[in-house]
Amino acid sequence: MKLVWLRSDLRLNDNPALYSACQSGEPVAVVFVATPRQWQQHHWGNNKISFIAAQLQSLRQHLNQRNIALHISCCDDFSAQPQHLHALMQQLGASWLLYNAEHGYNEQVRDNAVAATLTQAGLGWQRFAEHNLLAPEQIRTGKGEPYRVFTPFMKKARRWLSDFPPQPLPAPAIQPFAVLEQLNHWQQIPTYQLQWPVGEDAAWQQLQHFCQDAMNDYQHGRDIPAINGTSRLSPYLTIGVLSSVAVYHYLQQRMPHGDGATTWINELLWREFYRYLMHHFPALSKNQAMYPHKEPKWDHNPAWFARWQQGNTGFPMVDAGMRELAQTGWMHNRLRMLCASFLVKDLHLDWRLGEAHFMTLLIDGDFASNNGGWQWAAGCGADAAPYFRHFSPTRQAQRFDPKQQYQTRYVPELADGRQSYSQPMVDHKQQCQQFSQRVKALSPKTATD
Ligand SMILES: Cc1cc2nc3c(=O)[nH]c(=O)nc-3n(C[C@H](O)[C@H](O)[C@H](O)COP(=O)(O)OP(=O)(O)OC[C@H]3O[C@@H](n4cnc5c(N)ncnc54)[C@H](O)[C@@H]3O)c2cc1C
């Protein structure tokens, strides 16, 4: 029997490991192993975990219709997984384990340990490349080095995609062997109540609606948080209900031209870029900045951090963003940039605190994109916002929410004319000047680059 181990690829369509197993002519089963303690260490929160649990139930139905069992098991953390999977394979009578690679450092260490344990036990394993738009080794500068700046990366990636358009794989066919029993050893409390409907069909429908309603004007609409100007597909992409390859292919077939689609594909390429960086610069997976010499000494101020977390800074645009996150498990990209910049450049607090807080609440919490976004905001990442670029909460509100529709949705006190709303907790201009001075003082090099 071939056992397919699903991780961040919870789908039937365009799943190389699953597809290959189902083409083999042997019985196939699928397993998902929950690792609650590891997830806690990675700051995964209930929104993401319960979305995964709900997606597994939907996926199980669809796999069962194809005569494929989905076993859901559980072990504490990654270090326990080699023995856990070995035991499971013995219990199920599986001789091969197939899986699609993941890019994180801990994930790769885990996969190598699993492969070594299985090899030693005389069992087979097959790792498929992580199914992204680009393989990280394909895209390099003229000097053969990895890119550190987005625009040249994006141009090269676009040329590559047009020369070698990636092809999604179909969902597996119905298998000839019936499902007998399915393990169910992870009892996630069914708390999923967020706004994203569960399942592959729902995700595809959302993409269709977005293409019909908002794609053509995406280049403008994506900046206005009060409207549905973006796809809101990130939760599906994060846990792999949709693959970027299948989404890209869909778009190429239906709307290959237009400013909206071009801009949207660039955003998918930002996602790709952050994964690419994780591959080429493993230090990023170990809590380190891409450019550590650009990081000033951070302050320690739990009271300020709590006010930021609670959306109680006295800056309505920042507070609306933070409350959107707390209430819905998602935050619009413009607000992610503003709130991240505020924590770092106005409050002088370590971006790692913000990264962990976002991860704990985001339904789309994705290590590479979240880490990339935070390092970008803090000015110490690849192609980051320079230290002297400060997002003004007031100016951002005037430009992107001039009628305060978004702000009053999450900060209803504003409607009473600010009386019941807090005063700004800091002087924005002064704080940002101090931030710039701190970074400038680090070394002569950082003042100019
Ligand atoms: C501080 C910070 C933290 C972030 N954390 C995450 C995270 O944990 N998970 C996550 O998926 N995205 C993260 N992003 C990126 C971005 O904010 C979200 O992907 C986007 O808001 C999701 O909404 P959407 O699906 O409507 O995006 P759309 O605008 O419709 O874009 C389509 C897809 O492109 C990708 N994408 C879009 N913008 C970016 C970007 N700037 N960087 C990387 N990928 C992008 C996403 O997969 C998104 O679903 C973060 C950005 C910042 C500044």
Image: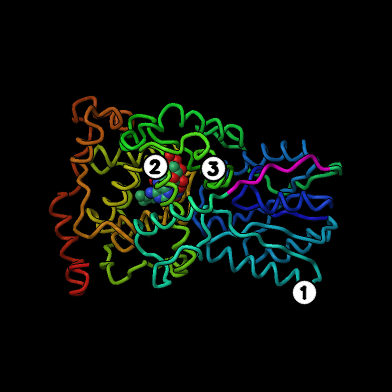
Do we see residue 307 in this rendering? no
Is residue 82 shown above or below 100?
A: below
Q: Nearer the viewer, mark 1 or mark 2?
A: 2
Tags 3 and 2 in contact by the CB under 8 Å rule?
no
Q: Nearer the viewer, residue 122 or 243?
A: 243
Q: CA distance from mark 1 to mark 2?
A: 49 Å
In this rendering, position of residue 382 left or right of residue 108: left
Q: Which residue is mark 2?
A: 262
Q: Which residue is mark 1?
A: 120
Tell me, for residue 53, which label it has, or none.
none
Q: Nearer the viewer, residue 356 or 390?
A: 390
Colouring method of the image: rainbow
Q: Is residue 61 one of those drawn in magenta?
A: no
Q: Residue furthest top?
A: 416
- Marks 1 and 2, the one that precedes in the sequence: 1
Do we see residue 53 in this rendering? yes
**What range of the chain is rendered magenta?**
167-175
In this rendering, position of residue 385 left or right of residue 132: left
Is residue 171 shown above or below 124?
A: above
Dot 3 falls on a residue whose secondary structure is helix
Residue 63 occupies quadrant: top right
- Callout 3, which amino acid? His
- Marks 3 and 2, the one that precedes in the sequence: 3
- Callout 1, which amino acid? Gln
Q: Which residue is mark 3?
A: 249
Q: Residue at x 54, y 38 (%)?
A: 250
Q: Residue at x 62, y 38 (%)?
A: 54
In this rendering, position of residue 16 left or right of residue 96: left
